[in-house]
Amino acid sequence: MSPELTIVWAVIIVFAVFVYVVMDGFDLGIGILFPTFEVGPDRDAAMNSIAPVWDGNETWLVLGGGGLLAAFPLAYGVLLSALYAPIVAMLLALVFRGVAFEARWRDPAHRKYWDAAFTGGSFVAALSQGIVLGAILQGVAVSNREYAGGWWDWLTPFSVVTGVSVVIAYALLGATWLILKTTGEMQRRAVRQAWWLGAGTLLAIGVVSLATPFLEGAYFERWLGFPNVLWVAPVPILVGVASFWFARSLHAGRELAPFLLTLFVFLLCFVGLGISVYPYVIPGAVTIWDAATDRSSQLFMLVGTAIIMPMILAYTGWAYWVFRGKVEADGYHA
C-alpha cells in the first residue's frame, strides 16, 4: 500500500462521484419535477433536454462504485453490507427510470404509467442517495474489519433529512437546467420553481450543516473548535455569497448563471463533506489507508484509469457540445 497512490485513488473516486451527482442530478431533478409539467409538448421537451446525455451521465456512477471496489475493497464490503437496502433501492430505481424513459416513447398507449414510473424512479433514486450519504455521515459500526450493525441502522431521522435534502437539491438542479434549455412558459415555470427550490435547498443545507457537528466529536471539533472554525468558515460564507448571486441571477433573467451557481453550491457541499470525514472512508472507523488495496493493484488500475478517464471526459464534453442550445418537444434547435 502506497500512501501517495491511496490519496490519488481517493481523489479519483471523489471526483467521479461528484461528476455523477452534478450530471445525473439534473436528470433526476427533471424526473422529480415531471408531474408539474403539462402532458404533451412540455413533458416531451423536458425529456428531450436530457435524452442525449442521461445514460452517459451514469458512467460516472459505475466509475465511482467500481473504483471503490477495486481501490478500497474493505470500505466497499463494509458499506455495501451496512447500506444494502438503500443501495439496492437506488439501483432498482435507476433501472426502472431508464426503462420508463425509453418505453414512454415506444408505448404511447400507456405513457401516463411510464411517466409515473419515471417520476417514481427518479424520486426513489435521489432519496436513496441522500439516505446513503446521511447513513455514512452518522457512522457505521465496524468490528474486526466487518460490518457489526443491524439491518435498519441506516434508517434514522438524520438520514431521512439528508435524503429529503438531496431530493430538493436535485429538483433545483433540474429546474435550473430547464431555465438554460427551454423557452417561453416552460422556462418561466422553471424560474418560479427555482425560487422556491433554491430557498428549500438553502434551508436543507442549513439543517444538515447544523446537525452534522453533533453526530460525532470529531465533526464538532473540525467545524466549531478553535482555531479550526477560522479555516472552515469560508465554506458557509461562500454558500451564502453563491445563494445571494443565485437570487440576483434569477431576478435578472440570466439563463446559465443559476445552473452554474447551483453546481458551485454542490461543490461547496462536497468540500464540507470532505472536511468532516477526511481521512476516513468510513467515519471514525476505517481510514482510506486502512481500506486501500496493495500498491501493485493501485498502480495497475491507475494506468487503465489514466487511459479511460480522458476518453470519458472527451465523449461527455462532445455530447454536451453537440446538443447545446435550446430544446423543444421535437428536438434541439440552436
Image (tube, rainbow, N blue to C red):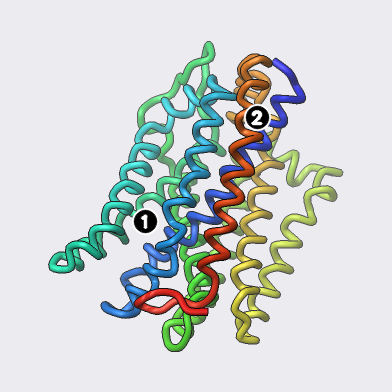
Secondary element at image label 2 = strand
Q: Are marks 1 and 2 in contact (CB under 8 Å)?
A: no
Does residue 36 appear in the picture of this structure?
A: no
Rendering quarter of residue 50: bottom left
Q: Nearer the viewer, residue 62 or 282?
A: 62
Residue 5 percent across, percent down from the top left:
72, 25
Circle nearer the N terminus (1, 2): 1
Does residue 146 appear in the picture of this structure?
A: yes
| Residue at x 33%, y 73% (from the top left corner) | 44
Residue at the disc numbered 1:
122
Secondary element at image label 1 = helix
Rendering quarter of residue 42: bottom left
Locate residue 98 relative to residue 209 in the image: left or right. left
Q: Residues within 10 Å of mark 1 (few under 14, many from 20)?
A: many
Rendering quarter of residue 30: bottom left
Residue type at mark 2?
A: Tyr
Locate residue 116 relative to residue 298 in the image: left or right. left
Residue type at mark 1?
A: Ser
CA–CA distance in space, label 1 to label 2: 30 Å
Residue 65 percent across, percent down from the top left:
50, 34
